[in-house]
Amino acid sequence: MSQHTKEVFFGLYNDEEDLIHAIEEANAQHLDIMDVYTPFPVHGLDKVMHLEESRLHIAGFVFGSLGFLTAFGFMTWVSVRDWPTIFGGKPYWSVPAFIPITFELTVLFAAIGMVVSFYTVCGLGPGVSNPVLDERITDDKFCIAFETSNADLDALKAFFAKTGAGEVHTKTI
């Protein structure tokens, strides 16, 4: 199994407003941003980064529908076909009695399905080791990272100086 390594040039910012302005400047200079790291969600970051809306809600609907069909179909099969029993004069196929279990399985399937989908798409899970550029990114620093394989380092240094990065580092990951 081969390890793919790359060199990353990144700058650390102290404030999210500085980060947003730096991203706008990078877009204006047509710089190819590898990724942006923040210690908390930053409002408007997805718009400035030109990120598409997540499609996770579609997966939630599909898994929820699967849960609904599983619950309703199984209870219908048991009540009507496999073990038809009359309880208190109620009909075999008593839909109102199916609602609570159908709701619970819909929510369960949607929740588990979306978690598994999210972890799969993000490349997370047991045994996965993700490199950390700087420990302070999860605490109080904001980071813009560029891959240096096809970048002009002098232009990136000038960019970080212009946008007010507190620190600039290079790391191989």
Image (spheres, rainbow, N blue to C red):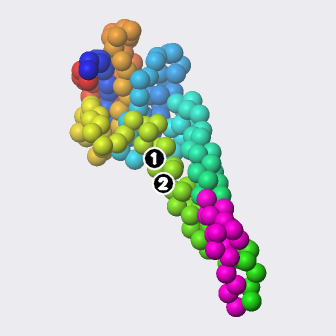
Side of 87 where 33 appears, left or right = left
Q: Which residues are magenta?
A: 70-88
Q: Which mark is residue 112?
A: 2
Q: Residues within 10 Å of mark 2 (few under 14, many from 20)?
A: some
Residue 39 drawn at (x, y percent): 35, 44
Tell me which residue sits at (51%, 49%) in the image. Answer: 114
Instruction: For residue 14, say whether it is visible.
Output: no
If the image is split into quadrants, where does the C terminus sit? top left
Q: Magenta-highlighted stretch: main secondary structure?
A: helix
SS assignment at label 2: helix
Image vertical order of residue 114 relative to residue 47, above or below: below
Membership of 79 in magenta stretch: yes
Q: Which mark is residue 116?
A: 1
Residue 9 drawn at (x, y percent): 31, 20
Tag 1: residue type? Val
SS assignment at label 1: helix
Viewer-proximal residue among 24 and 99: 99
What is the C-alpha distance between the residues marked 1 and 2?
6 Å
Tell me which residue sits at (56%, 64%) in the image. Answer: 105
Image vertical order of residue 59 relative to residue 148, above or below: below
Viewer-proximal residue among 118 and 67: 67
Membership of 46 in magenta stretch: no
In the displayed image of the protein, which residue is found farthest to the bottom? 88
Circle 1/circle 2 CB separation < 8 Å = yes
Viewer-proximal residue among 97 and 39: 97
Tell me which residue sits at (52%, 61%) in the image. Answer: 108
Side of 171 where 83 appears, left or right = right
Tell me which residue sits at (66%, 65%) in the image. Answer: 77
Tag 2: residue type? Ile
Residue 156 drawn at (x, y percent): 36, 15
Image vertical order of residue 12 relative to residue 55, above or below: above
